[in-house]
Amino acid sequence: MRFDIITLFPAIFDGYLTQGLLSKAIQRDLVEIHRHNLRDWAPPTPHRPVDDKPFGGGPGMLIQVEPTVRCVEAVEASLPGESNRVVLTPQGKRFDQPMAEDFANRDRLLLLCGRYEGFDQRVMDILQPQEVSIGDFVLNGGEVAAMVIIDAVIRLVPGVLGDEQSNIDDSFSRGNRLLEFPQYTRPREFRGHTVPDVLLGGDHAAIARWRAEQSRRRTLQRRRDLLGDPQNLEIDNLEIDLNQTKRNHPKSE
Ligand code: 6GU
């Protein structure tokens, strides 16, 4: 899978591209990431400007349509096939796991990172990109959002994760729309906090039942919205342990 990132700050990605799972996926030729500096498509006069004040007034600056469209067209002309244009903007559709799964099925993704007050509207009108937001808050630019999207998508590219099962088990994936159950590793006891007995007993059916119940209990307590219509789910005899809620989320009460 190939990503092309169009940005005014390509160096923001330096650390991200050279560490962890992503750098391994790049080394193994499973993922290619190419950065393009939007400023390279600005007129050469004197400081290669890419932004200007909004017509009609208002705060801040906008990224101009001309360098942006030229840059996208130049990047696409150098490559075969469909590019799947995405603009990162708080005005976009909220990114989620189904969207990550959709992106992971494409060969190429072109990510356009906004800065300042965003792009001239004609960037969207001419390029017809998908507009994507990573949540209801405002970032200083689309670069961090692009990293979020790349991070979520590459884990779904076959071969990137060692264990293919682990992204099927992940919260929000197609196989599981619930939050994950709690997990424990050694030691069995720390400062009086012990591991639940069922996990130590070796009864795999009992462990699976306990984990399923924990997942549903957590989801009910923290993210009821994920369950949809509660009447469609077998949660009638699920006792909510409010003391446990308080222990885990002392500030949420
Ligand atoms: Cl994609 N961009 C910016 N600038 N802010 C955001 C965002 C994107 N998603 C949430 N906030």
Image (cartoon, rainbow, N blue to C red):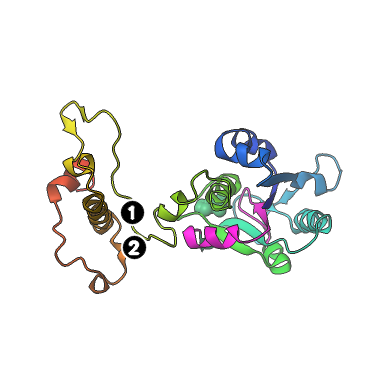
Q: Nearer the viewer, residue 71 or 18?
A: 18
The disc, 2 or 1, on the residue closer to the chain's N-terminal end is 1
Q: Is residue 35 above or below residue 134?
A: above
Circle 2 Cα neighbour tier, 10 Å, few/some/many (<14 / 14–19 / ≥20)? some
Alpha carbon separation for disc pair 2 and 1? 9 Å
What amino acid type is highlighted by mark number 2? Leu
Determine the image quadrant of residue 121: bottom right
Give residue 79's position: percent from left, percent from top: 80, 56
**Residue 233 visible somewhere in the drawing:** yes
- Dots 2, 1 in contact, CB < 8 A: yes
Question: Seen from this angle, which residue lies furthest right?
Answer: 44
What amino acid type is highlighted by mark number 1? Leu
Disc 2 element: helix
Q: Which residues are magenta?
A: 95-120
Give residue 112's position: percent from left, percent from top: 67, 53
Disc 1 element: loop
Residue depicted at 63% across the width and 54% down the height: 118
Determine the image quadrant of residue 222: bottom left
**Tally of numbered tags:** 2
* For discs 2 and 1, the disc positioned in front in the rendered view: 1
Q: Nearer the viewer, residue 203 or 197?
A: 203
Disc marking residue 179: 1
Residue depicted at 56% across the width and 51% down the height: 149
Residue 107 magenta-highlighted: yes
Residue that mark 2 sits on? 226
Residue 194 magenta-highlighted: no
Horizontal placement of 100 versus 110: left or right?
A: left
Give residue 84's position: percent from left, percent from top: 68, 62
Q: Is residue 41 above or below residue 85?
A: above
